[in-house]
Image (cartoon, grey):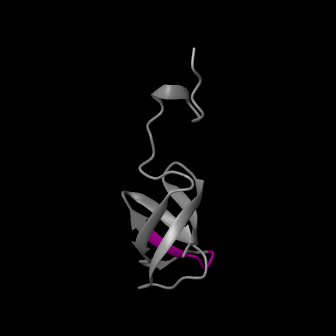
Amino acid sequence: MKKSNQFGGSKAPRSPVSVGEEYIVTIDEMGKEGSGVARFRGVSIYVNNTNPGDKVKVRITKLGRSHAAAEVFG
């Protein structure tokens, strides 16, 4: 029997983004902690050292149910 590396097993819904993947996003607003927030495929992505209006290439570093953390890449 093959085990899944996602919490909840193989029946858990897959996230539209994955850790380690890279995306080009536009920062929409500032979050409470001062990080820029982009919306991508229904997921809020928090990116440090960005401002609203910035278009940046990011790499996903952490993943939650409806949000992710990313770093500017490239």
- Residue 43 among magenta residues: no
Tell me if residue 11 comes above or below residue 46 in the rendering: above
- Residue 35 among magenta residues: yes
Number of dots carrying numbers = 0
Q: Position of residue 36 (x, y in %)?
A: 53, 77
Q: Position of residue 44 (x, y in %)?
A: 46, 63
Tell me if residue 20 comes above or below residue 1 in the rendering: below
Of residues 53 and 71, the one nearer the viewer is 71
Identify which residue is drawn at 56% across, 73% down: 73
Q: Position of residue 59 (x, y in %)?
A: 54, 64
Q: Position of residue 42 (x, y in %)?
A: 37, 57
Of residues 19 and 13, the one nearer the viewer is 19
Identify which residue is drawn at 61% across, 76% down: 48
* Quadrant of residue 68 within the rendered picture: bottom right
Screen quadrant of the N terminus:
top right
Residue sitting farthest toward the front? 74
Tell me if residue 56 comes above or below residue 22 in the rendering: below
Tell me if residue 72 comes above or below residue 21 in the rendering: below
Identify which residue is drawn at 59% across, 23% down: 3
Screen quadrant of the C terminus:
bottom right
Residue sitting farthest toward the top? 1
Of residues 26 and 24, the one nearer the viewer is 24
Identify which residue is drawn at 57% across, 20% down: 2
Q: Which residues are magenta?
A: 33-38
